[in-house]
Image: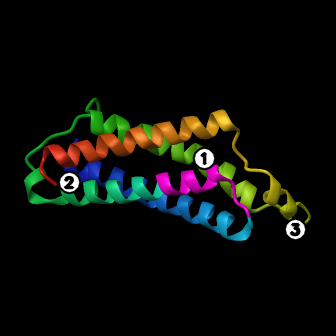
Amino acid sequence: MEPLSLAFGIAGLTSLALELNKIISEYIGSVKRASAESCELAAELSALAHVSERLYLFLGNKGAKCKSFDNTSVLYSVTASCHDKLNRLKPILQDFMNASEGRKWYRNIVWPLKKIEHLQIIKILHQCMEIFHFSLTIDGW
């Protein structure tokens, strides 16, 4: 896989992380006492978006053009895994935020993710971010 193809995958990941962060930020803004979990997830998504954006810029840079990434490379598999996790999270958060008027009170007292799900998502996102950050560090970015 060429760096440009991987860069487009990472750009999509950045966009998805920002979109989910916006949904969670809307939740946090609409609930007086948003759960610590929602704030933690928003922070992790924001960090992931920032690091993946930097990785996108690096992969589009002339210095990365000489590198080749096949579909077994760590960056490729981490990008795909992270993208998959965010795509599964998106409908859960959208459905939660798009609750009918009669159920909006529900948002004030319940976070849509179970504790174990939440911890698992945070762990995966954090690992993805660390791998992206490590990739940038190796190349001096």
Q: Is residue 7 above or below residue 23?
A: above
The image quadrant of residue 46 is bottom left
- Left or right relative to 27: residue 40: left
Number of other residues with Cα within 10 Å of mark 1, as a class: few under 14, some 14 to 19, many 20 or more = some
User: CA gap, disc 2 to disc 1?
Assistant: 26 Å
Q: Main secondary structure of the magenta part?
A: helix
Residue visible at 36% across and 37% down in the picture:
78
Near mark 2 (Cα within 10 A), the count class, few <14, some 14-19 or many ≥20, is: many
Q: Which residue position is annotated with label 1?
A: 89
Question: Label 3, on which residue?
Answer: 101
For badge 1, the amino acid type reads Leu
Q: Secondary structure at mark 1?
A: helix
Identify the residue at the far top of this view. 72
Q: Residue at x 23, y 34 (%)?
A: 70
Q: Check if residue 24 falls in the magenta segment.
A: no
For the record, the magenta segment spans 33-44
Quadrant where the C terminus lies?
Answer: bottom left
What crowding class fits label 3: few (fewer than 14 Cα within 10 Å), some (14-19), or many (20 or more)?
Answer: few
Q: CA distance from mark 1 to mark 3?
A: 22 Å
Above or below 89: residue 51: below
Q: Secondary structure at mark 3?
A: helix
Q: Residue at x 40, y 38 (%)?
A: 127
Q: Secondary structure at mark 2?
A: helix
Q: Is residue 101 left or right of residue 89?
A: right
Q: Residue at x 25, y 32 (%)?
A: 73
| Dots 2, 3 in contact, CB < 8 A | no
Q: Amino acid at mark 3?
A: Glu
Q: How much space separates mark 2 and mark 3, taking CA atoms?
A: 45 Å
Q: Is residue 44 left or right of residue 89?
A: left
Q: Which residue is mark 2?
A: 59
Q: Amino acid at mark 2?
A: Leu
